[in-house]
Amino acid sequence: KINVAVRRQLSTLPEPNRSTALAAMKQSFAVICTSVKECVEVSDIIAPEHLEIHTRNGWDVGMSCLNYGGIFIGQGAAEVLGDYGAGPNHTLPTGGTGRYTGGLSVFDFLRIRTYMQIDSTEQCQDMVRDTVRMARLEGLEGHARAGEQRLISVQQQSKQQQQDTNTNGTNREEKKD
């Protein structure tokens, strides 16, 4: 029924829309599910660019979906309205990429910066050892060796602690003057 109805609608489109739509339909398919829960599961696997929810409790159903580009909930909602009228977006992830990203937004134009600061090599030795281990597991020997350069031997730790004690004692004396 669905495929017949879609073909009938496509046949009434003017060119070049009909050819474009027919080409797109070669990669399209209909899925018949036995429950709304199964519909959500199938949808989450596919991660569609556009997901329209036209069911009772549409909001609850829509909020149970995890992977989609844009979601359109309610009898009055349609993908075309999201593209051209009401928003929210016309540039959405395709090809299942809705599993890990959303539509184009202001966040795509922000520059996210990450940083790391380690002031105490002594306090991060467990992390350094884990890092060396992980680098080797991934086959990145250069990374492992760079990590090893940050490992402190027991003798070096003892010397560092002694220097810290001496420095702290000197600083205390200087402050007393």
Image (cartoon, rainbow, N blue to C red):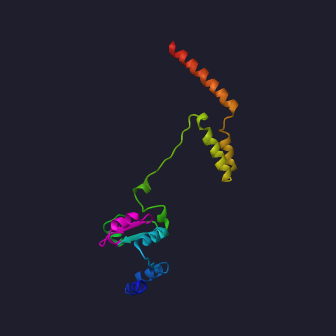
Q: Is residue 110 above or below residue 52?
A: above
Please provide the residue range marked out in magenta. 54-78
Q: Nearer the viewer, residue 140 or 67?
A: 67
Q: Position of residue 86 (x, y in %)?
A: 31, 66
The image quadrant that residue 53 belongs to is bottom left
Q: Is residue 15 visible?
A: no
- Kindly indicate the quadrant of the structure image that contains residue 107: bottom left
Q: Position of residue 72 (x, y in %)?
A: 35, 68
* Residue situated furthest top in the rendering: 177
Q: Which one is nearer the viewer's eye here, 93 or 37?
A: 37
Looking at the image, residue 66 lies above or below residue 150: below
In the rendered image, residue 87, in percent from the top left (x then y), is placed at 33, 65
Which residue corresponds to the image point at 40% horizontal and 59% vertical from the top-left?
Answer: 105
The number of numbered discs placed on residues in the rendered structure image is: 0
Left or right, residue 59 beside residue 68 = left
Q: Residue at x 70, y 30 (%)?
A: 155
Locate the N terminus and report the quarter of the image it occupies: bottom left
- Where 149 sits versus 172, above or below? below
Residue 100 among magenta residues: no
